[in-house]
Amino acid sequence: MIADALKGKTILITGSTGFLGKSIVEKCLRSIPDIARINLGIRSSPRRPAAERLEREVLSSPAFRRLKEELGDQRFAALAAEKLAVVEIDLGRDGLGLDAAAQEQMRACDIVIHSAAAVEFDNPADLSAQTNLLGAARLVGALTASGARPHLVHISTAFVGGMLRGLVREGPPLDPGLNWRHEAEVLSNLRGPVEEESRRPEILNKLRSEARSRMGPAGTPATARATERLRERWVKDRLVERGRTHAHAMGFTDIYSFTKAMAEHAVVELHGDIPLSIVRPSIIESSLAEPFPGWLEGFRMAEPMILAFARNVLRDFSGMPDTLLDVIPADFVVNTVLAVAANPPPDSKPRIYHAASGTRNPLRLRRVPDEAEAYFTKHPLRDRYGQAIGTPKWTFPTRGELATQARTAMRFVEAAQWVVERLPLGANVTEISDDLTAERDRLDRGLNLIELYGVYTEVDCIFDTRNVMALWEKVPDAERKTFPFDPALYDWTHYFQDVHLPTVVRMSRADTSTGRRKQPSGSTAPKAESSSVRSAIERRSGRPDVLAVFDVDGTLVETNVVEYFLYMRLRAQPLEDWPAFIASMLRKGPRWLFLERRSRAEFQRSFYREYDGLDPEVMKRLGREALDAVTLRRIYPEGMRRIREHKRAGHRVLLLTGALDVVVEPLAELLDVEVDCAHLLVKDGRLSGDLQSPPPAGEARGALLQEYAERNGVVLSESFAYADSLSDLPMLEMVGTPVVVNPDARLSQVAGQRGWRVERWRMAPGNWKLPMPDPRSPEYLEAVRR
Amino acid sequence: MSRPGAVIEVDRNTPPVLFHFGEGIRLEKLPLGARIVYPPDPLDPIAHPERAIKRALAKPLEDDPLKSLLRRGMKLTIAFDDLSLPLPPMAAPDVRQLVMEEVIDMAAEVGIEDLHIIAALGLHRRMTEDELRHIVGERIFTTFHPDRLYQHDGEDPENNVYIGKTAKGEEVTLNRRAAESDLVIYVNLTLVPMDGGHKSMSTGLASFRSIRAHHNAKTLLASRSYMNPPDSALHHSCIRQGQLIEDTVRVFHIETTVNNHAFPAVANFMQKRETDWTAQDQAMFLATKQMTDIMPPAFKRNVFHAMRAPYGMTAVHAGQVDAVHDKTLEAVHKQINVRVEGQTDIVTLGVPYLGPYNINAPMNPILVVCMGLGYLFNFYRNMPVLRKGGVLILTHPCRYEFDAVQHPSYIDYYDEVLADTTDPIEIEKKYELRFAEDPWFRQLYRKSHAYHGIHPHYAWIWGAHAMEHAGDVIFVGADRDVVHRLGFKCATTLEDAFEMAEQTVGRYPSVTHLRMPPIMLAEVEA
C-alpha cells in the first residue's frame, strides 16, 4: 500500500538536513525503490552552497551507512545521483526565493513533506516564529502560487494542544483566540526593540560593569569584547524569555509548540484545495530498528537529562511520576509520515495523525528513571578514577520546589564566589574559586533542564492515536514488516535497555568501560614529570626569533609593587616610626585593592605617587639591596629554571613588567635578560611619582610586546608568554604558547576556557623574613636625627 | 682539670640522653646495654690570647719571625677562613680578628701600604657585610672595606690564575692577588682535623677547576675518614696542590685552635653530660623543649642562630705549613679525641640545627645529609664506630625548606637531580658540569650570597662514604617525603627506628649513641 502508492511519485522534502528529514530520505531510498525522485529543499548557507550541504550534511550522515554497506559506495552514489535533487528553497523569504528551475521542480512534485523546523525549546522568539510559523505559511503560499496541487504533509508536534489534561484528540490545535499573522508579525519583529533596549544606558552600563569586574584588568579592548558578548547573550536571553513567557501565557509548554500550533492554524487556513495531512509526533527519540537501532542525531530532549541522571548531576526532578511521557522512536515517525504521504485525504479537509505512543503503548514518567537506573546499574558511567557513578533516586517534588531549591543553592554559590574573587589572595583561592565555578555550572545545568523540560513532565495528557491506528489497519501484512508504525509493536524495556540508553551513552562519549582502562598497578615509583611547555621549548630550540616573555611580580617572584615599597621605606625608618607609617598605608589599602581589581594600570599610577619626593639614588641603592633581601628570597625556582631553559634553547628572554626599574633591573642584570619596566620621572633630583609612560598593563602590555616583536624580528606565534594575572591577558593572547602561572581566580577561568597550560610555581619554603631597619644606612641616621 | 671524653653503658639509672633535632631537642631513653660516647669537657683556654699570638709570630715553627719577612713596599696579602668556621660563630672578638690585628699592626710598623685582606671562601657563599665585620672586627672592616678587604671570587675569569699541575695531574689555580703577592699570610681557625694545613690555600683561594680535583665522589669514597688526614685521599690531594702553591708563592701560616665550648650559658645543658645536669639545667632543658615544640620554625631559627659560642683559644702556631699543622692537629686531638672500643651494629646521632653551610639559614635536606652522614659520621679514626652494614639512625625534622638566597642550586639539586638518582657517582657523571657551569648560579655566587652551583653536590658526596658503609639509614621524626627523596627510611620514634633496624642487624643489636655536638673524634680500636 505504501510502496505502491509512492511508486513513480516525486517528493519534496524540506528540512532534509535535520534528523527527521534525512531519516525520511534514507527510508525512501532504501524501501521505496520505485520512487521517481526526491527533491531536497535546501537553502544555501553563507558558508556552503545547497549542493554541498546535501553532500556534507545529509549523505555523509551515519543514517546512510546501512545503505552504503548494502549497495557499495559506487552504487549508492549512482542511486543518489539518480533519485536525489536539490531544490534551493529559502523558507525565510516570501516566495521561498525560488528561481525558474526550482519553481518547475516544485510544480512537478506529487508530495511535499514539510519537516523544516527550529526544534529547540529555548530558541529566541523571533527565530521560532520565522522558521516554524512563517516558514510553513510561506511554503503553502508558494505552493498555491505555483499552481501545483501536491499532497502536503505538514509535520507538527503533538504538543500543539498545549498544556492539556486528559485525552487529546487528533483534532485542531489549542486556539486561545489568536491571529497567527499578528503573532508572526509581533514575534518576528521582537529583535529590533530588544536590541534597542540592550543599548539603553542603564542596561549597557550594567553589562559593562559586569564585564569590567570580570575582565577589567585585561584592558579596554578585552572589556569591550566582553561587554558585547554579554549584550548579545542578554538579547538572546530576553528573546528566549519573551518567547517562553508568551507561550506559557497562551497555554503552551514552550515557544516551539506555540509556533507550531500557530503554523497549523496558518497551514489549515491557507491550504485551499491542496490536500493536507498533518503528522504530529510526540517526543522523537532514537530509532528502534532502522536504519539501525539507536540511530539518533544531535542531543534532543531526554538525552541531556538521562546523562545528567547517570552522572548524578541532576539529583532530583519534578513532575508527577504517574503521568504519561509520550516518547516515539524516530523510525516509527518516519513510517507514519510515509504511510500518511501515501494516503492523501480525498477532500480538502485536513487529516491529522498523532505519531505517538499514547494510548497504544503508554509510558509513565516513573518508568524512565527506573529504566535508567536499571541500565546504569549494569553499565554505569565512570568518573575520572574509573569508579562507577551511582545514580540518584528521584523523589519528584513539584517544579516550584525544585527550582527554589536549586536557585537558593545557586545564590549561595554565587555569593561565595563573589567573596572569593574579591579577596586579595590571588592564586591562593584559585582552587576554591574553580570548585565554585564547577558547582555553579552543575546547578546552572540542572536549573536549565528543570526550566526547559520540567513543564513537559507536568503535561498530564494522553495522545489519542485513532487516526494513525485506522491507517495501520489499512497496511497489508506484507508491508507491516517494512513500514512498522504501530506503537504496540515494541516493548519499553527493550527500547530503553537495548536501544535508547546505549545510544545516549555512545553519543555522549562518556566512559563506561572497565576493560579498556588498565587497572592501576599500585606502583608508587616516582613518575617522570612531563611538561608540554618543555617539549615546545625543545621543538623550537636554536631559534633566535622565538621570544619568552615573563611577567615578574607574581610570575617569577612572589611579591608585588606594594611589598617592595614597604621594604624600601621600612628599612630606612627607625622602628618607632613604623606604626604611624603602617597605619597610613593601611588607610589607603582598600582604595588600592579596589583600583587593582578594576585596572592594574590605574592602581600602579595611584600607587607610584607614594614615591613622590624620594631620592632616586637612595631608591636605586635600596632596590639593589631588595634584590638579595626580597627578590631572590621570594623567587620561584621553577621560574628561574624555565628562563634558563629558554636561554639554553637560544630564545630571547624579556621581562615585561609594571614593577619599577629600581627593583627589576638588578634582577634582569643578574639573569642577563632584557627588561621593559616602569620608570618614574625625576624632577629637581627627586622622584616625582609620575610615570614616564603609561604602565605596561592590559592592552598597553600587548602593544609593548607587539612593538618589541616587530623591532626585533620575533615570531610571536612561536613565542612563549608567562603571566599570572588578568591584566596580562592581551600579552598572553598574542603568543603561540601562553603559560599561565599561579593564576588568580579570574585568569584561571579564562585559561580553563581556552585550554591554556596552567603551572603552579612555588617559592622555596622557609624564606619569609620581616624587613628590618638598617641602622647603618644614611637615611636611617637622617631619620633618627630628625 | 677538664675531663676526658667517656663511654658509658646505659643501665637502669642512666638518665635519658639528649638528641639534637634540628631547631629542637629530644630526650630519648636508650635500650639497656647501649653505650653513650661523650666528648671531653672544654680545655682551659689560653689566658692571654694576644700575648700567645705575639709569641707565635715572633718564634714561628721552621720559619723566620714574621717581622723579618715584612719589608716596606712589598705586596702583602692576608687570607682568612670564612664564616663556615667555627660553629656556632664565635662570640666577639673572633680569634681571626685578634691574629689579623696583630699582623696588620706589624705591617703598619714596617710601612707596608699594599695590603689586601681576602676572605678565602672557596666556593662558599659571599658573606654579608655584617658577617664579614663580625669576623674581622670593626677596626679592620672600616679601614679596609671594600677596596682592600674583599672576598675571593672563584668564578672571576680575571682574578684566578692557573699555576700548574701536580704530579698526579691535579690542576691548581690560585687567586691572582695571592699569586702575585710577595707574601701571603694565611690566618686559619681549625675546629676539626679536616681543616687547615695545605687545604686552607688549595681550597680557600681556588676555583672549581682546581677544587674538582679532590671534591669528587671517587676521592671522597677513598677518604676514611676525611677527619683523619693520613687516611684521607682528599687531604693527600690537597697537600699535593698546596705544595705546588708553596712553590709558587711565599706563604706564612698562622693556625689557631679553640676548645669545644660550643654553647653559651643559656644552653649549658647541651654542653654538659646528662648525668651532670643540675636542677637549673633540667629547667632550661624543659623550657627549651617546650619552646621548640610549639614555635614556628622561622622563629626558632632566629633564636638558635643568634647564639654565639664562648669558644676559648687553645693554641696558636705560625710558620711553615706542615710544622704548624702538626702542632695544630695535636691541639685539636687533645680537645676532641675519645677512645672507643669496638664497632656497633647501630649508631645513633642527633643532627643539630647548624652545619658549616647554613649560618643564618635553614638546614635544608641536602645539608642534613652533609651534616649527619657527612661530618658527624666521619668523626672517627681507624674505623667507623658503625660496623660495615650497620644501621645509622639520625634525628632531624628534615623539612622541605631552603634558603632561596644562600642555596638556590640546592633547590634544583633536590628537585631535579635527587628525583633522578641519589648515587653520588652517577650524579657526578650526569650533573657535575651542568651545575658547576650554570650561568645563573654563577651569577648568584658572584653577585649575591649564594653557594656555588656545584656546592650541593659537594654537600651530597660528603655523605658518600656513609651511604656506602651503612646497611641502612633511618631518620627519626623527619618529613617522610623528603627522606624518601634522599633515599633513606623514616621512622616516627626512636623505638620504631630500632625495630626497623632489627631487620638489617638482627635482634639485640649493639648500639652506640654519639652525643654530639660538642664535637668529638672517636678513636675506634678493634
Image (cartoon, coloured by chain):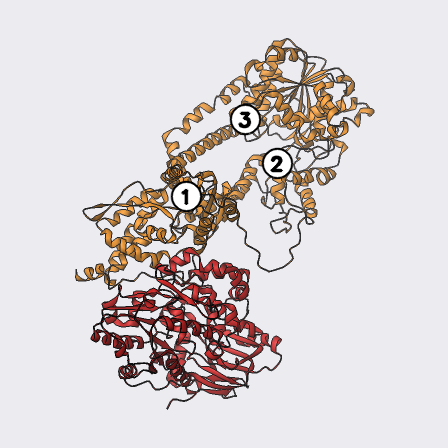
Residue marked by disc 1: A726
Q: Earlier in the sequence, mark 2 or mark 1?
A: 2
Mark 2–mark 3 distance (CA, rounded to whole Å): 18 Å
Which numbered disc covers residue A457? 2
- SS assignment at label 1: helix
Q: Earlier in the sequence, mark 3 or mark 1?
A: 3
Q: Earlier in the sequence, mark 2 or mark 3?
A: 3
* Type of amino acid at the residue the image marks with label 2: Thr
Depth order, front residue of A506/B391: B391
Quadrant of res A522: bottom right
Q: Is residue A403 found left or right of A653 in the rendered image?
A: right
In the picture, one chain is red; tell me its letter.
Answer: B
Q: Colour of chain A?
A: orange
Looking at the rendering, in which quadrant would you find the N terminus of chain A?
A: top right
Q: Residues within 10 Å of mark 2 (few under 14, many from 20)?
A: many
Chain letter of disc 3 in the image: A
In the rendered image, is residue A365 in sight? no
**Quick check: A603 above or below A764?**
above
Asked if labels 2 and 3 share a chain, the reply is yes
